[in-house]
Amino acid sequence: MRKIYTNYLANFRGLSHEIWLLALVTFVNRSGAMVIPFLSLYLINVEGFDLPHVGWIMSCFGLGSLVGTYFGGRLTDSIGFYKVILFSLFFGGVGFMLLQFIDSFYGFCIGIFLLTLMTDSGRPAIFVAADTYSRPENITRSITLIRLAINLGFSVGPLVGGLIIANINYSSLFWIDGVTCILAAFGVIALLKPKKQKDKKPEKTIVVKEGVPPYLNKLFILFFVIMVANSLAFVQYFSVMPIYYEKVHFLSEDLIGWLMFINGATIVIFEMPLISWLDRKKISKTMATFWGIFFLGLSFLVLNFTSWTGVLVIAMFLMTLGEMIGFPFSNALALEMAPKGRKGSYMGLYSMSFSIAHLIGHNGGMNMANSFGYFSTWNIFAIFLLFVASLTIWLFFMLRKAERRKA
């Protein structure tokens, strides 16, 4: 056990202090967004919206994330990562504080869209900054540390947010979220010196593109459909599921925060060792994607087995197991399927699967729960994911057949 712990820490030795500061800023930013996991509960319990209205507001959350990430990348290229990070932290903090003063449906749609646009505009800038402040041999480990900070923030944020709501109120959550983001912005100004992005203008080379674009690759389109479907179900855990915890199992916000903490903490502790072990076992990336979908579907199914509240913990572990196995290997599968010279376009389409899921998944789940009830909704998602898993098996055999033709 001590050897495992030592090897785990060894992965992060030798990184620059700027990278550690970026990780700290990312952690504050992600954990500071503790409003988001409880947003659906706030909209229902405090603002009095029904499930369909909450679904549309959450769709605006997804749209804001999509637009913010896109323009954040463009702004990073034009004005530099440093200014974009400051903009995202400061105005995101102001946005969190102002959000509590909105009380109309259309106001929330616009407010949530603008808030996530500002907060998520900093995501591309953080990774560009990691590249700039890293030595070439440390880039991969630097990005790993940033990803670890993101997951740690997503685990601590809901826990702290739940405790704040239970012991103080929702309003204080917005103030604390806003203040922490603004303090992080001032921390960047005080501790992180601006640095020019690494020169990315090598000698002109001729890029040879092989294969076909992603939208003409039938197998990749099948894979894209699988990932959209999987993500549609996955996002339910961050919008519809908190409402289910409260309305059906009568959990308070602090207990909901503890449940969400299980997800992030488990990923932080076990994902790297699990992925390394599966890599050594040489598991097929397609089959790993299948198992990720299978465990996610099982997490919905077990919720209807019993009314015992402990089943929520079991479901959360199953979902987390599916997330840890499925997402890293599906990412690697997308890269593997991309031909030479077209990896950017293939990964762009792969990334869009999550944006599409945020746009329609929250809304669809809210309306299903409102129309059919939670019991039927979880069964529908379980059966849906069983079908998606069968598509993944089909993709596995189709890819093997394609490999044999090449050989």
Image (cartoon, helix red, strand yellow):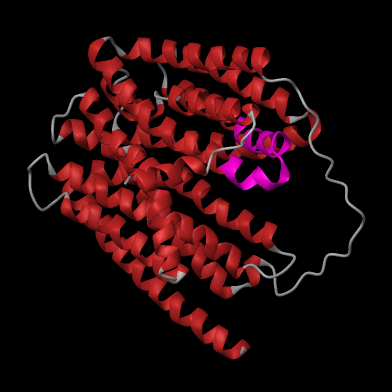
Q: Is residue 404 above or below residue 113?
A: below
The quarter of the picture where residue 92 lies is top right
Magenta span dominant secondary structure: helix
Q: Is residue 107 above or below residue 399?
A: above
Image location of residue 401, percent across then percent down? 51, 86
Q: Is residue 33 left or right of 167 when viewed as pictured?
A: right
Residue visible at 35% across and 68% down in the picture:
389
Q: Is residue 396 left or right of 261 when viewed as pictured?
A: right
Q: Extreme right residue here?
A: 204
Residue 134 colored in magenta in the image = yes
Q: Extreme front residue here?
A: 3
Q: Is residue 373 visible?
A: no
Residue visible at 29% across and 27% down in the picture:
41
Image location of residue 199, percent across then percent down? 84, 41
Image location of residue 39, percent across then percent down? 36, 27
Residue visible at 19% across and 56% down in the picture:
301
The quarter of the picture where residue 155 lies is top left
The quarter of the picture where residue 200 lies is top right
Q: Toward the viewer: 312 or 242?
A: 312
Residue 325 colored in magenta in the image = no
Q: Toward the viewer: 171 or 279?
A: 279
Q: Is residue 18 left or right of 360 when viewed as pictured?
A: right
Q: Is residue 12 visible?
A: yes
Viewport quadrant of the C terminus? bottom right
Image location of residue 109, percent across then percent down? 48, 28
Q: Toward the viewer: 88 or 110?
A: 88
Q: Is residue 222 above or below residue 140?
A: below
* Magenta-drawn segment: 122-143
Number of marks in picture: 0
